[in-house]
Image: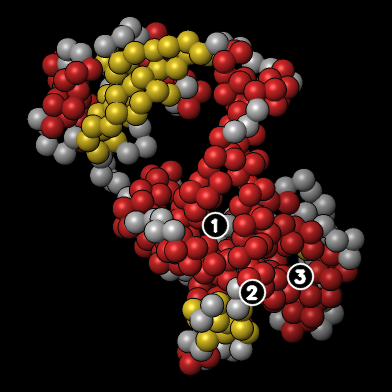
Amino acid sequence: MILALKYDRPRPAAARKPRLTLLAAAALGTLLAPAAVLAQQTAKATPDKTGTSSSTSQSIVVLVNDEPITGYEIEQRMKLSFLGAEELQQRLKTKLKSPKINDQFKAFAIERLKADPPKTEAEQQARVKQLQQQFVESLRKDVETDFRPVARKKALDELIEERLKLQEAKRLSVVAGTEDVDRVISGMAERNKMNPKEFAEHVAKMGANISAMRERIKASLSWSDVIRRRFGHQIASIGGRDIDRMAAALSGEDEVELHVHRILLPLPAKVDQKQAVQRLSEAERLRAQFSDCKGTSRLAAANSGARFDDLGERKPGTIPEPTRSLLMNAGDNQMIPATIGDGGIELWAVCGRKTVKAEEQKRQTAEADLRQKEFEILSKKHLKDLRQDAHIEHR
């Protein structure tokens, strides 16, 4: 919905009265802040509403088997949950779709226009835009205030469960290591077209701390190992009949999987056309030296700044165009022409391929789904048992 104001031509201030009209349109999104912006504003605005002093945030809120959870940890976890801002965004959209939104905006705008009426057409247009932003901002703040108790409860429950998960992981000596967490963080950074340091800085700018994200990942990885250690034999013993029954309900066709290597020649964030052309020329010189996949890693190592990745077997659908089509048309042990990817200049090579039959694929999918469902059932049950046996003291 777009909120708009319509005025008569400027008249003397004493006689001028604004006339308001609200125009409904399909472009609701133009009025809403993007999710990332909303998340940033939420994260920044949230602490101001708590009234929580630094001493309070450092106080112990809950003891889980004598391990403390502080107010600071809860605040950090809340900020982390605000990053996606999906629920906040949805609540804001719901408010903006309310049948009463017209009357609310009219009252909001008239009050402000009476105090300072616009004098020119240009000023009218500027004030309309300003009032729209102010109105949505006031709604957003209301949504945040209403959402905080829900977010706090979720954050506290999550932290309690993580304490229990890590305590059980320590007992079984399967706590995830720093390098395991680093790999996950690196993957998240790459998907966001950043390196780990840039990703951490981005999270900080959004109002959260990367350490809170690392703790969540550590608990998740450790808990997966706990369930595998304790119940792996049950998960592995899924019956063939169950797999056959589920596979029969799936549809599918034969698929090709490509074994691919990639050499990446990084480009700086700001690069001019001349630098890009120069880097492409370097990539083509490397391609001319390529003979087969056995030497791809050595070829990359001989070029300063180049990075080699053995990406293993990939389904073509996971590879972006035009690289996908070029790889599908290439022969084994063949490197395709250089392309520009997210991180720089890319050289892809096909190192092998195999056809996965539809029946085999359906059985693999069915088995994976059944194992995942069994994993989730056992995970919830074990966590429930741990929580029932735990000493949880709220302060």
| Lower sequence index among marks 2 and 3 | 3
Residue 264 position in % (x across, y down)? 26, 32
Residue 331, image x and y in percent?
33, 7
Q: Residues within 10 Å of mark 3 (few under 14, many from 20)?
A: some
Q: How is the image coloured?
A: secondary structure
115 over 110 or under it: above or below: below
Q: Which mark is residue 227?
A: none
Q: Residues within 10 Å of mark 2 (few under 14, many from 20)?
A: some
Which residue occupies 9% across, 30% down? 302
Picture disc at residue 152: 2
Query: For this view, does 226 lie left or right of residue 148?
Result: left
Give the image quarter of residue 204. Answer: bottom left
Q: Is residue 305 left or right of residue 42?
A: left
Q: Any mark on residue 10, and which?
A: 3
User: Which of the two discs, 2 and 1, labels the residue nearer the N terminus?
Assistant: 1
Estimate the x, y position of residue 354 in percent, counting from the top left.
43, 11
Observer able to see residue 195: yes
Discs 2/3, front? 2
- Residue 309 in percent (x, y) is at 28, 32
Q: Is residue 70 above or below residue 315?
A: below
| Local secondary structure at mark 1 | helix
Instruction: Tell me the kind of residue under disc 2.
Output: Arg
Quadrant, the N terminus: bottom right
Residue placed at 78% from the left, 73% from the top? 109
Kindly identify which numbered label has been placed on residue 36.
1
Q: As shown in the figure, which amino acid type bears the numbered disc 3? A: Pro
Going from the N terminus, do you reach mark 3 or mark 1 first? 3
Q: Amino acid at mark 1?
A: Ala
Q: Nearer the viewer, residue 278 or 150?
A: 150
Front position among marks 3 and 1? 1
Residue at 73% over, 62% down? 92
